[in-house]
Amino acid sequence: MTSPKVLIIGGGLGGLTLAQSLRYHGIDYELFERDEGPQARVQGWAVALQCPSACLWGSQSRTLQVDIYDAYTGESIMASRGIDYSPGTFIRVNRVKYRQYLLIGLDVQWGHRFSHHEVTESGGVKAFFEDGSTAVGDILVGADGLRSRARCAIVRDTMYQPNPPVLNTVPTGIIIGEVTLNREQCERQAKLGRAFHACIGKDVYLFTGLKSYSSDLSEGYFYWLFFFAEAQPTESWINTASKAELLSFVKGKVQGIYPALREIVDLQKVEEMGEPFVLYDRVPEMCPAGPVTLIGDATHPMTPLRGEGANNAMRDSVELGMKLSEAIQLGTSLAEALRAYEAVMIPRATQSVLLSRQIALNLER
Ligand SMILES: Cc1cc2nc3c(=O)[nH]c(=O)nc-3n(C[C@H](O)[C@H](O)[C@H](O)COP(=O)(O)OP(=O)(O)OC[C@H]3O[C@@H](n4cnc5c(N)ncnc54)[C@H](O)[C@@H]3O)c2cc1C
């Protein structure tokens, strides 16, 4: 059997990992990304890769990478809450550098915004892009994130219902800030947690993470996320609030917390506030019979409160690559390989979606 061609829509962490997985198995692919190039858009800050067996750096580290505190007393509550971020459970990576790493050896077709697809008479698939170009393959994988057009096309074709909506709105908002710290300030943050720390208390859920250091280590680039209960998520005030109003809201919430834990917000400049948003998630479902499937946020977006979205996207990619490789070796149906991948992915990702949702719903409100 000749190698089939897989069309991948989206070059985020999921799509790039899938391309690497297919490359490893010697399976032909074409990867289409709407961005004009790898630096075209801000890629976020950092991500924790869960890697129990391979995390040598973590297992040898003697300094604390992560901690979670009571917002008001400043005491660590990680152990009492049963949260396990012990050395060896994860590696924290800068997202831009990690994406560059995943791009090694890959051929990405930049500037291709996917529009829709059609299943061909031979059972293959034809993808259409907004610039009028098309591509033909045996399988199409939607790795195009939260607002996935690939998912919309599948849902519309098979089970379109205006209510309930395809994405679940979680009644939680995030306000974001980015701060450049001098060396002394960096050292104070590192004492709280070298990779990240969070503090939790009534009306407060503040996450602070390291993005990167300057090459001479004189400055550190940090970001913080303030999670809050939002009773009106679909018409949240944050959508129209000014940066000054967003910062003022967070300052008001953290003013009574342990001083070291709010230093990052105290140092925030109004003009460096990020874009706020409310959270969405979705329990993944089987795709209809045929040559199309979804991976990552396209099928199971989840709140970031357990740090599992990208990890699930990458596991999807590895498992899908293995199922396709097995089908090619055995000469069995590729469409059935997609359903076999979904059968493994759905229970795993559903658990992550629901546990991540639960934390958002249980924020100390
Ligand atoms: C604040 C925050 C912190 C997080 N921290 C963590 C963490 O620590 N650990 C963790 O595991 N997860 C974390 N996540 C979740 C993680 O970011 C996502 O789950 C992950 O990025 C999903 O990867 P993806 O490839 O499926 O989608 P995306 O990263 O969204 O990539 C989708 C790609 O598809 C492209 N695309 C979209 N539409 C089209 C189109 N029509 N045509 C062509 N291309 C298209 C986009 O440009 C993009 O490059 C966090 C999320 C947030 C918001």
Image: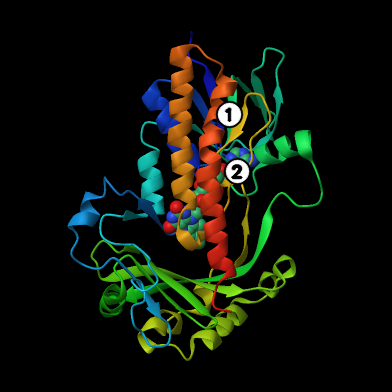
Instruction: State the separation of the CA atoms marked 2 and 1.
Output: 14 Å
**Percent coordinates x, y for residue 100 in the rendering:** 38, 44
Residue under pointer 2: 299
Three-letter code for the amino acid on which mark 1 is drawn = Arg
Q: Horizontal placement of 308 versus 172: left or right?
A: left
Q: Horizontal placement of 249 versus 209: left or right?
A: right
Q: Can you say which quadrant of the picture contains the C terminus?
A: bottom right
Is residue 275 visible to us here?
A: no
The quadrant where residue 8 appears: top right
* Closer to the camera in the image, 41 or 323: 323
Q: From the viewer's perspective, is residue 299 above or below residue 258?
A: above
* Disc with the residue nearer the chain's start (2 vs 1): 2
Tell whether circle 1 marks a residue whose Cβ is less than 8 angstroms from ligand 1.
no
**Percent coordinates x, y for residue 287 in the rendering:** 65, 34
Q: From the viewer's perspective, is residue 65 above or below residue 300?
A: below
Badge 2 crowding class, 10 Å Cα cut-off, few under 14, some 14 to 19, many 20 or more, is many
Identify the residue shown where x is 40% and y is 71%: 81
Is residue 99 visible to us here?
A: yes
Identify the residue shown where x is 55% and y is 82%: 203
The quadrant where residue 45 appears: bottom left
Residue under pointer 1: 339
Question: Extreme top residue here?
Answer: 1
Identify the residue shown where x is 56% and y is 16%: 333
The secondary structure type at the circle numbered 2 is loop
Q: From the viewer's perspective, is residue 327 above or below residue 300?
A: above
Three-letter code for the amino acid on which mark 2 is drawn = Thr
Label placed on residue 51? none
Badge 1 crowding class, 10 Å Cα cut-off, few under 14, some 14 to 19, many 20 or more, is many
The secondary structure type at the circle numbered 1 is helix
